Image (cartoon, rainbow, N blue to C red):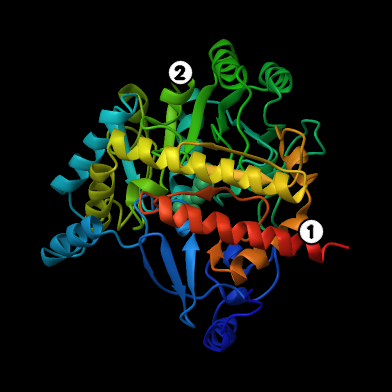
């Protein structure tokens, strides 16, 4: 089997990139810090496939970290974007496509009565914190360990060893005075969340309804309904950060999947179909607090960009219930296939999926928290990652990232993926000391 692939051109590009960008990248995870080795330098993608700068071909399960639910460069999106482009690339004025995309979101997520488009999930989450604080007149925010809500100061806060503590900054440059307003608690720990909500006046309780940023971690059945109850009893707003889960875990998102309606929601990734779009929204009376109707300021020169709106519209238009169900079924086949492979090789393993979002850990016991995730075999993960890469399967370069699936991954692609992963796991296990 393959032991190496051509990499001279990628190495040359990365050498130039390292002179121009910190770590050679424009977002840290792309540097492959979690697994080591040369980063992937992308050249081209089509459907389920992506090619690196050396011409090596990969079956892709990163899919731009979630947005590409129709696969790379789908014709419907290319056509919609090129049509939109003929009329101009940006206006900084209202356009009809913005209204159409907001309508399309509300069709599937009726609680998104009113939205505001932004260019990144970070902006959406950051503004939700501001809005929730303004609406409630409170300053504390409760988040959960291992949940990522973008890189705004308020969210770059780490949990104190399982016990809820006043937040400590996770990054230099985040003012301690601000970080202490962000409280953290273990995911799935309802009792601790209730205790914190009683003790501190919370503006918002914010979570990824399924975690995708510390591996794929699902909520226990009572967790999300319990948080709704705590929020109602204590006057906090319940916020779903669906930047990753939106239009992936269920056709109508977390509200449909868990039967719980949040007060405010952040969206991103899929709603831009590979172009920079995110949004925050919720009930009309809450969103009316945003400027210019309300006093909470938030703005963006390129917000609602016409090319990005066209890509989002084409993507959500093509993502019918039937297509969503198809991708969900294919994801199930991949996940079950991986379980079978792990069993054959006798390695501790757990894997699951919700809709087209999936993940696995080299660990037998169920994973309910980030601490559980950290007990998985990350050495085996690294070996498996590199073995898979050498065999033309592109997995997320970290044991703590979710995987994705697209409508372009058909039966043949999945069967081929499983054949390669079987071989890759064999090689990774053989390498183990
Ligand atoms: C990706 C992500 C963000 C940040 O979105 P960006 O567009 O990268 O700023 C926020 N929240 C969640 C849950 C995400 O997965």
Q: Check disc 1 and report its element: helix, strand or loop.
A: helix
Dividing the picture into quarters, in which one does residue 25 lie?
bottom right
Q: Position of residue 205 (x, y in %)?
A: 57, 27
Q: Badge 2: few (under 14), some or many (20 or more) residues near its Cα, within 10 Å?
A: few
Q: Nearer the viewer, residue 276 or 34?
A: 34
- Separation of marks 1 and 2 at Cα, in angstroms: 38 Å
The residue carrying mark 2 is: 259
Q: Does the beta carbon at disc 1 come under 8 Å from ligand 1?
A: no
**Badge 1 or badge 2: first in the primary sequence:** 2
Dividing the picture into quarters, in which one does residue 46 lie?
bottom left
As drawn, 75 above or below 25: above
As drawn, 226 above or below 347: above
Q: Which of labels 1 and 2 is toward the front? A: 1
As drawn, 24 above or below 246: below
**Horizontal side of residue 307 vs 370, given as left or right:** left
Quadrant housing the C terminus? bottom right
Outermost residue to the right: 433
Residue at the image point whose x is 57% and y is 66% from the top? 30
**Horizontal side of residue 256 vs 201, given as left or right:** left
Outermost residue to the top: 233
Task: Say whether residue 215 is visible.
Answer: no
Residue at the image point whose x is 22% and y is 53% from the top? 310
The residue carrying mark 1 is: 379
Q: Nearer the viewer, residue 50 or 348?
A: 348
Quadrant housing the N terminus? bottom right
């Amino acid at each position: 089997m393959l032991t190496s692939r051509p990499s001279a051109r990628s190495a040359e590009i990365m050498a130039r990139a390292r002179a121009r960008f910190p770590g050679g990248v424009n977002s840290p995870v792309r540097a492959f810090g979690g697994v080591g080795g040369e980063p992937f330098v992308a050249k081209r993608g089509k459907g389920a496939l992506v090619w690196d700068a050396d011409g090596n071909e990969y079956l892709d399960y990163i899919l731009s970290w979630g947005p590409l639910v129709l696969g790379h460069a789908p014709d419907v999106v290319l056509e919609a974007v090129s049509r939109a482009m003929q009329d101009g690339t940006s206006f900084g004025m209202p356009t009809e496509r913005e209204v159409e995309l907001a309508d399309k979101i509300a069709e599937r997520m009726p609680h998104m009565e009113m939205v505001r488009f932004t260019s990144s999930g970070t902006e959406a989450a950051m503004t939700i914190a501001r809005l929730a604080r303004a609406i409630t007149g409170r300053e504390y925010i409760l988040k959960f360990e291992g949940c990522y809500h973008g890189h705004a100061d308020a969210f770059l806060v780490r949990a104190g060893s399982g016990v809820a503590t006043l937040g400590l900054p996770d990054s230099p440059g985040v003012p301690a005075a601000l970080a202490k307003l962000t409280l953290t608690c273990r995911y799935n720990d309802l009792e601790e969340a209730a205790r914190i909500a009683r003790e501190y006046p919370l503006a918002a309780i914010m979570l990824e309804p399924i975690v995708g940023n510390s591996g794929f971690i699902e909520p226990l059945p009572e967790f999300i309904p319990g948080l709704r109850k705590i929020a109602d009893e204590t006057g906090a707003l319940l916020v779903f950060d669906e930047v990753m889960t939106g239009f992936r875990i269920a056709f109508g998102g977390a509200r449909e999947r868990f039967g719980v309606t949040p007060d405010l929601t952040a969206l991103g990734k899929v709603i831009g179909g590979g172009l920079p779009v995110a949004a925050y929204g919720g009930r009309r009376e809450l969103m009316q607090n945003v400027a210019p109707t309300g006093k909470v300021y938030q703005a963006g020169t390129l917000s609602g960009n016409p090319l990005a709106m066209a890509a989002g519209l084409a993507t959500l238009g093509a993502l019918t219930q039937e297509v969503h169900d198809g991708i969900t079924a294919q994801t199930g086949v991949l996940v079950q296939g991986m379980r079978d492979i792990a069993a054959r090789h006798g390695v501790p393993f757990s894997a699951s999926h919700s809709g087209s979002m999936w993940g696995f850990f080299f660990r037998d016991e169920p994973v309910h928290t980030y601490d559980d995730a950290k007990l998985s075999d990350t050495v085996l993960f690294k070996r498996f990652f590199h073995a898979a890469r050498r065999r033309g399967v592109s997995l997320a370069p970290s044991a703590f990232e979710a995987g994705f699936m697209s409508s372009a991954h058909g039966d043949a692609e999945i069967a081929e993926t499983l054949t390669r992963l079987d071989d890759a796991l064999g090689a990774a296990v053989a390498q183990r000391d």
